[in-house]
Image (cartoon, helix red, strand yellow):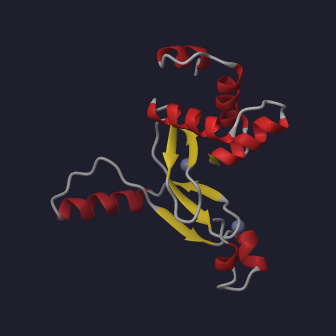
């Protein structure tokens, strides 16, 4: 992706912080980040952009289709690069870890369910909530709820 060109197409100046935000999504271990995560990474690099501005830039990228904005229960809106393909998510309600998956059988079943009810699907999102392996090891069932983010 030619980021400066993408930004110009959007009528956005290719300012250093804007470029850096997109690079962070390309480089970061965690593909899914909220405004706070991005704000902190910028801050660590000495880029002084306010949280509200970070959020506004992320929303501009989402409106432009460069990023996808995801809504999950109990966590702030997260953003990820729009790489074209579809995937679903697993979310740890204790530590906020997110994993992606794509299961052909589930996809087909959803299509079939919709068809049986005379729906034509144009999109869906499937989010599975629970504890990741690390958290399940250290927590007893029920304890995680108390540590939910937000
Ligand atoms: Zn976890
Ligand atoms: Zn994802």
Residue 1 higher or lower than 123, as above or below: above
Residue 52 can be seen, yes or no:
yes
Label total for image? 0
Which residue occupies the foreground of this view, 55 or 88?
55
Q: From the image, which quarter does the N terminus lie in?
A: top right
Q: Is residue 31 visible?
A: no
Q: Is residue 38 above or below residue 48?
A: below
Left or right: residue 124 versus residue 83 is: left
Q: Is residue 134 left or right of residue 150?
A: right
Q: Identify the image quadrant of residue 49.
A: top right
Q: Position of residue 99 (x, y in %)?
A: 61, 56
Q: Which residue shows up at 67% across the image and 41% down it? A: 51
Q: Residue at x 64, y 78 (%)?
A: 145
Nearest the viewer among 43 and 19 is 43
The answer to whether 104 is drawn above or below residue 74 in the figure is above
Indicate whether 150 appears above or below 42.
Answer: below
Residue drawn at x 50%, y 41% is 68
Q: Residue 5 in the image: x percent, y percent?
A: 55, 14
């Amino acid at each position: 992706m030619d980021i400066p060109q993408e930004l110009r197409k959007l009528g956005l100046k290719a300012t250093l912080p804007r470029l850096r935000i997109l690079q962070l999504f390309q480089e970061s271990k965690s593909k899914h980040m909220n405004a706070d995560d991005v704000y902190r990474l910028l801050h660590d690099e000495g880029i002084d952009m306010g949280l509200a501005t970070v959020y506004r830039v992320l929303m501009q990228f989402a409106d432009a289709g460069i990023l996808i904005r995801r809504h999950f229960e109990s966590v702030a809106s997260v953003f990820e690069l729009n790489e074209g393909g579809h995937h679903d998510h697993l979310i740890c309600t204790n530590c906020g870890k997110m994993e992606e998956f794509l299961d052909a059988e589930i996809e087909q079943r959803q299509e079939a369910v919709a068809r049986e009810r005379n729906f034509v699907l144009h999109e869906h999102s499937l989010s599975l909530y629970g504890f990741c392996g690390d958290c399940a090891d250290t927590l007893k069932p029920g304890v995680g709820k108390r540590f939910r983010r937000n």
